[in-house]
Amino acid sequence: MPASAVSRLLIDGLSIVLEDLLLAGDNALVIAMAVRGLPQSQRRVASIFGAAAAVILRIGLTVVASRLLGIEFLKMAGGALILWIAVKVLTDAATHAADVPARGSMLHAIWLIVFADITMSIDNVLAIAGTAHGNALLIIFGLCVSIPFVVFASNMTAKLMDRVPLLVYLGAAVLGKVGAEMILTDPFVAGALHPSPAMTWIAEGITIAAILVVGRYLCSRKCA
């Protein structure tokens, strides 16, 4: 293989790894929020299996990524799921993590991670596919390298939330922004409303406020 081709391969591989790491922040946060209701012993297992399953699906979806961007209601469903996760975690925010009742099985948490990760990552998959220039090995390499980072970041975030409950509210606010953005960029919503940047910012702000208010209200009712 010519030296120029090797250099190009290395540059593309490094670019994909960096893209994965830069774009994995939201995914790690979703995983942290999804596993917070699980016992400590199950968090890492759920994170690993959830992230690994999502990556495997992402590899397959890369082939049809451009078509996925045009599927109506897919991103809307993913955004709604993320908003639901944010509200559910805020409902338990006043309770110490060790006392948080389980919100379903580990398999349920893994399912939440996989579905949220896939719907959040459609745009990212398309960008990575473009960087890889159709090289499946590069795509697989980049996504697999990102798994340890996502698992480590999600578990570290979950532990920080246990120690600093205020971070739960910050995480819920971030997920509120992500969920609202996903819903507004769904092909159906975008085609019907044609949201401007200002409308998007207002909608995200309203969504964040609503999540914090509803989550706080449900939390206060639960603790009463």
Image (cartoon, grey):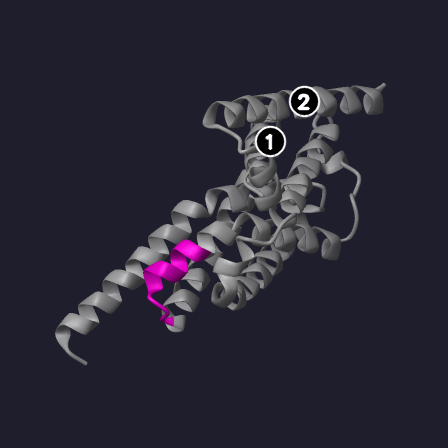
| Residue 86 percent across, percent down from the top left | 66, 34
Residue furthest to the front in view is: 192
Q: Nearer the viewer, residue 169 or 4?
A: 4
Q: Residue at x 65, y 47 (%)?
A: 73
Q: From the viewer's perspective, is 89 left or right of 18?
A: right
Q: Nearer the viewer, residue 159 or 185?
A: 185
Dot label at residue 210: 2
Among numbered discs 1 and 2, the one appearing first in the sequence: 1
Residue furthest to the right in view is: 224
Q: For residue 75: magenta?
A: no
Q: Residue at x 36, y 60 (%)?
A: 130
Residue that numbered label 1 is attached to: 176
Q: Residues within 10 Å of mark 1 (few under 14, many from 20)?
A: many
Residue range highlighted in magenta? 126-135
> What residue type is disc 2 on?
Ala
Is disc 2 placed on a helix, strand or loop?
helix
